[in-house]
Image (tube, rainbow, N blue to C red):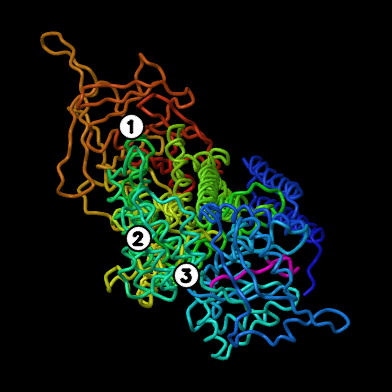
Amino acid sequence: MTRLPIHVQRRWVRLSILALSALASFALGWILLDSGQYEDYEQLVAWIGLFVSMAALLVSLAQLFPTLPPPTDAGQLADDLAISVRAQWEEEVAARSLRTPRVIPLDWSATRRPVAAPPEEIHRGVGDGLVLRPSLNGRLEGDFDAAARRLAEGYRRTPAGRLVILGEPGSGKSVLAAILTLGLLAEREAGAPVPVLLTLAGWDPLGESLKDWIERTLGTAYYGGRTEIPKMLLRAHRLLLILDGLDEMPEASRRDAVSTINTTCGDGVGVVLTCRSTEFQDVIAGGAPVLRRAPVVEVAPVSTADMIAYLGDTNWPDGVQWEPVYTHLRAHSDGPVAAALSTPLALTLARTVYSNTDRDPGELLDFDSSHAVQDHLLDHIVTAAYAPNPGRDGGRDTDGWEHDAKQAEKYLTYLAVYLQQHRERDLVWWLLSQRLSSPLAGLAVGTAVGLLATFAMIVRILSVGSDGDAPLPEETVIVGVGCAILATIVWYAAPGASPGALSLRREGSLGRLGRGFSTGLKLAATPALPVCVAGGIALSFSSGWNEADLAGIIVPTAAVCGGVIALCLALAVNSWLDAPPEHSKKAGPADLLRQDRRSSLTGALAGGVLFGAIVVPLCSITWSTVLILFSAATSNPIPSSTTTFIRDNLSSNFAYSSTLSFILTAPLPGAVLSLLILLTRAWPRFSILRFSLAFQGKLPWKLMRFLSDARDRQLLRQSAGAYQFRHIRLQERLASHAPAQDRSAPGPRTGQRAFHAAIGATAVALLLTGALLIPDTDRPSFEFINTGDVAAMTFGPDGSQTLITVDKHGNIKNWNTETGDAVAVPDHSIPKGHLESSDESTRPLTLTSGGLLHTTLSEDTVSGATVSEDGYEITPYDTHELLPWRKGESSLKIDYIEGTIEHASSDLRYLLQTEIAEYGNSLRRLDTLEDDKVDCEVPGETDGAYWRLSGNGARAATSAGKRIYVMNFTDCKGTDDLWSGNKPIDSLALSHNGRKLALNAGGVTWIRTIAH
């Protein structure tokens, strides 16, 4: 399929955005005109214009993010990589002390083993049918740089740029490969192939192609995990592959490896392969083809004269006598000691052990085999590496170093066992977490995140106050459990992250933003689809589809969509920050760790801050806008003006009612998302594992510092982005010291896979269960209830879930505010005559959540003030009696209160009065328990209106015309909102906590959350 040019693609994107915006505007206008409601929709049109403007702005911003330009010239990229590779291996050569005191002399010559290609193929020249036969003999000695130069010159004489280097264990094959790499880089011409030294132990030829492995290894080591540049360099033949350690691969993989190298690396690609002599011969004898056009050389053992000369050039501490050993070596050049010391590995081990300890080299003469000599040196190398330099401060400092050496050997043994179990040489820090973490680690991390979220919610409750807008305790538990489930799912869903790098680049921004945005959509769709399907099925089989149920699904879905958009934008920013670097960087484990830590923290922080800042406004805007459109389409009014509704929705339903609430709430969703993002990255997972293993005593607390120090002590070496033991023999020897049960290979992870599957199934089951319960228990609070005309109403004694209405004929009905359904009326003893309203102009019934407040005169025959026999005036007083809703409950009475009682709390503790002549337009709240009163001034527009008090006495509300007034008695601050319905408000009621308002207009009752 032909790919459209990028400018054509972007033109179609712009046209699509503008077309969708125009279509949305047309649809909204049609809905408004068709609904016949023209009141207070000017601001909605303004919102529409705002969205269209934002869409146009996005189209303009798209111009600022050009796509990734064509890659730089391959020659320039190769030159850039050569600088990084040379810096890496110069540092490694210095760490291995290969320059001092001098290079160990090494000799090599053409092998006599039947493992090479025919001479006529190897030496086939170019032009005139000439056959070139350069000598394959060589010797490496003297100054390091001069030796590297000579080695590189010898390699360039190979006809096809291919070579196989064989040798015994510890014979210096890896050292030769490193020296060759630096020698080639020292005299490399611009644009020439770059020698890259790779360890074959990390390649599985059955599971990954050679090209993919090379691209992945180089991408991780030098390009922040990106493979685009290595892929282009490999395709352009700008890489010279130096593949070290074929023998370190599993035996079953070696034959496939040689075959794949032959197949993948055709003519024009330089290849250098190192392997043990016997192992390579076995591979070829087993049916593997020889490396095409590659001569095979074999490193000879170090001669007796060379080993004595090398040891003699060392500055030994006083008292260390090597003469007896030298004498023995000259007399028994074929003995076990000579055989053991005939490799550079054994010579450097002997130099370290006897330079840093008080041991006598003469003990080497007591062993009867070369393996015993080498095992003896390996057994003491860790102690020698951690011993202080002799002669310092007049003698060897023994304070604490032996304990450090024992601890270090314990830690190194644990790592050696780990590598042996996985048949690997590379100690890659980002693979440790997925291999060594307990199957229960995800549950532990999820629990910790859930507890942190719960603690943060509790802090917010305590800070805002129980009478404020803080979440309820059950909401706190739900948030904590939800965060725990999310963290657990993320832990098991993203186990294999590679280290990333932070790079602020404009190139490719649109692609990275789109990749992050699409990731957010995929993450949201995974739980959303089963929830929507389950909810639809449950609703279809329960109450069926109707207008109220449709609103109960569409409107909260709109709020979720706002959250999804915020999530996608946050992940887009996180993805944008994780950009491929423009240049290669020196590869080192510590460098990769620092890069990933910086990238992880920056990306998670940026994504979390953006998400925390926009998730609530976006949810509120989408929630409110869809509800407004739905109300217009169904000809149902919303319970306030458009602007007020969006503002109150933002502050109440999404908990932003004050500056303090914003400060305490906004960081919470951002912090949760930041934690979830971090759980997908390599550095946080490695840190969690590191602390876990350190707590168990298996590894040190500062693991990377320990590994770097072990490398400085020449116990480890560094290869690209991984650590390795300085030789496989040291790794094997340390692993052999561990108990047998610890050395056993890890079994198949079927149990862990089953555990992961169980976690996923549990999460889906929880989501489905929640969806099934939505129609019955989670109907949103913005629903309207078809209660009919009512004379008075109040919220029931069980809080805000029940609404009690009384019509003018005295009929009582109970309604479930969560479902909108009528429920059974409890048996009560209130006379129906007290509930009837014969004249609409009479004072409305005074209903409270505790019952009907009925007022009578103390003497029915007294109609006014009378005079007693002694001349004093007698004033009749009112008896206020609270008749309970439930039969059998005792009524409450208050005999005398000065003034008229407008309303009361359910227990008659708080009484509300309005007719207070000396205060004018005022509300008075009386506290009969504390004998206290609060007077608050109210607007003049409320004169003659009937106020209703919340059950806890905190708020009062009334209506006048199309306005709703709410008064807070804590600070006497009030708010007034515009009612957008076509009909006046007939009655209203406040819930016990004052956070919900019920208003009846035109036979429909709306339940609304109050923000202030």
| Residue 648 is inside the magenta segment | no
Q: Position of residue 622 (x, y in %)?
A: 57, 50
Q: Nearer the viewer, residue 982 or 477?
A: 477
**Which numbered disc flags the more N-terminal residue, 3 or 1?**
3
Q: Which residue does the image show at 34% across and 37% down from the upper left?
A: 393
**Element under label 1?**
loop
Confirm whether residue 635 shows in the render. no
Left or right position of 819 against 247: left
Residue 673 image position (x, y, % from top left)? 48, 51
Q: Earlier in the sequence, mark 2 or mark 3?
A: 3
Query: The residue under label 3 is which amino acid type?
Result: Ser
Circle 2 packing at 10 Å, graded few (<14), some (14-19), many (20+), is some
Which element type, helix, strand or loop, lies under badge 2?
A: helix
Above or below: residue 266 compared with residue 901: below
Quarter holding the C terminus? Answer: top left
The percent coordinates of residue 593 (x first, y second) are 50, 52
Q: Is residue 237 magenta?
A: yes
Q: Depth check: give the residue in front, 149 or 369.
A: 369
* Residue lying at 43% horizontally and 53% vertically, measured from the top left: 713
Instruction: Identify residue for label 3.
Output: 342
The residue indicated by pointer 1 is 954
Instruction: Report x, y in % for residue 401.
Output: 30, 48
Q: Which residues are magenta?
A: 231-245
User: Which residue is under mark 2?
Assistant: 361
Residue type indicated by callout 1: Ala
Instruction: Kindly check if marks 3 and 1 are in contact, taking CB atoms under 8 A apart as contact.
Output: no
* Mark 1 Cα shell of 10 Å, populated few (<14), some (14-19), many (≥20): many
Question: Going 36% across and 62% down the picture, which residue do you hit?
Answer: 324
Q: Amino acid at mark 2?
A: Pro
